[in-house]
Image (cartoon, rainbow, N blue to C red):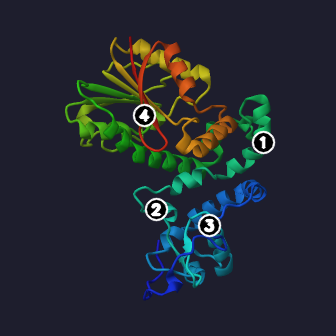
Amino acid sequence: MTTVSPTPETTSAAATPLTAPHVSVGQAPPPSMRLRELAFGAACAAAVRAAARLGVADALGETPASAAELAPVVDAEPVPLQRLLRALCCYGIFSETQDGKFVHSEMSRLLREDDPNSLRYIALWCTEPWTWEVWPRLDDAVRSGTSVFPETFGKGFFEYLHQDAGESAQVFNRAMTTSSVQSAQDVADLLDLTGVASVVDIGGGQGHVLASLLEKHPSVHGTLLDLPGVVARADARLREGGRLADRVRIVPGDCREDIPVEADLYIIKNILEWDDESTRRTLRNVVAAARSGARVVIIENLVDDTPSMRFTTAMDLLLLLNVGGAKHTRESLVGRMSDAGLRVGEIHPVNAYLHAFECVVP
């Protein structure tokens, strides 16, 4: 996207970002105001979505720019755009200078398409149109303990996504790819593959984690197992002609039904959030497929992980609404693994929002 043309920068106080409009540094709102702010949380989510869809972060370069300068670039009206940016500045997404211009913050840069850690598609996925239909029914889901999606839309979540919401399905794919790519290197950096000759990524999506591991460990061979429609879009490095293809086997299949692969290391990342029975079947299938002594590494978000609890508990509630699933606590996940017959060892943080559980098949 085109950015606003740079203008000569000055070192005057006018270019100094404000911390937030009309709020003193360190001044915390009283509980009554904080609750009001939380009740208006949809406004913040909508503002993030609007900024992502308009491409405001992409339009804003390294020079302070006014809403009037940004408006023609993002095809918006100047005054409403200024109102949007002012609201976002309150949350640290963009900053406003003394002379009413806007500059990037650490968070606003994450909405840029070209940022290596971009969260643009994650932000869009979390605010897709269907989410605004199911969130108001959270009390119904809490009462029943089941998804409200089929009753709201007349069909299951993934069926609706692929049949009736093509644009949302594309956003989902981009968001999942972004998340996987960004965490793949963290996983590769964490895992010690000493003594491992073969690894299988179960429900591994397009295989970004597997590709990162194979690139770091040239002697290791790998298998990617996921649904046929998913592995058909596997990372280009793994497909025929790719630089890792000679060390990879791509197996279409459903890990809840069977895992027809024997390996030294099994990786299961962010797929044990379905209903309990599906989770139990998957883990039992791993134990049935693996030889004694094989390693199993399970990587998940946790709802009792203090640094990221606002994020993971929100994901947990959305899973309840759309598929009837749930995120795990350490205790619940260890319980599922132990019930399946795995011997659970150490738990390691992968990054700010993921943990890896080391297990061994007895």
Of badges 3 and 4, the one in the foreground is 3
Q: Which residue is mark 1?
A: 137
Q: Which mark is residue 88?
A: 3
x%, y% of residue 58? Answer: 48, 69
Give whichever of 149, 28 is nearer the camera. 28
Image-based side of 120 in relation to 76, left or right: left
Of badges 1 and 4, the one in the foreground is 1
Q: Earlier in the sequence, mark 1 or mark 4?
A: 1
Please tell me whether mark 4 sits on a helix, a strand or a loop.
loop
Q: Which residue is mark 2?
A: 113
x%, y% of residue 310? Answer: 61, 45
Q: CA distance from mark 1 to mark 4?
A: 32 Å
Q: Earlier in the sequence, mark 2 or mark 3?
A: 3
In the rendered image, the residue lying farthest to the left is 219
Question: With respect to residue 236, does 295 lie above or below?
Answer: above
Q: Earlier in the sequence, mark 3 or mark 4?
A: 3
Q: Earlier in the sequence, mark 2 or mark 4?
A: 2
Q: Earlier in the sequence, mark 3 or mark 1?
A: 3
User: Which residue type carries mark 1?
Assistant: Arg
- Residue 109 visible in the shown view: yes
Please tell me whether mark 2 sits on a helix, a strand or a loop.
loop
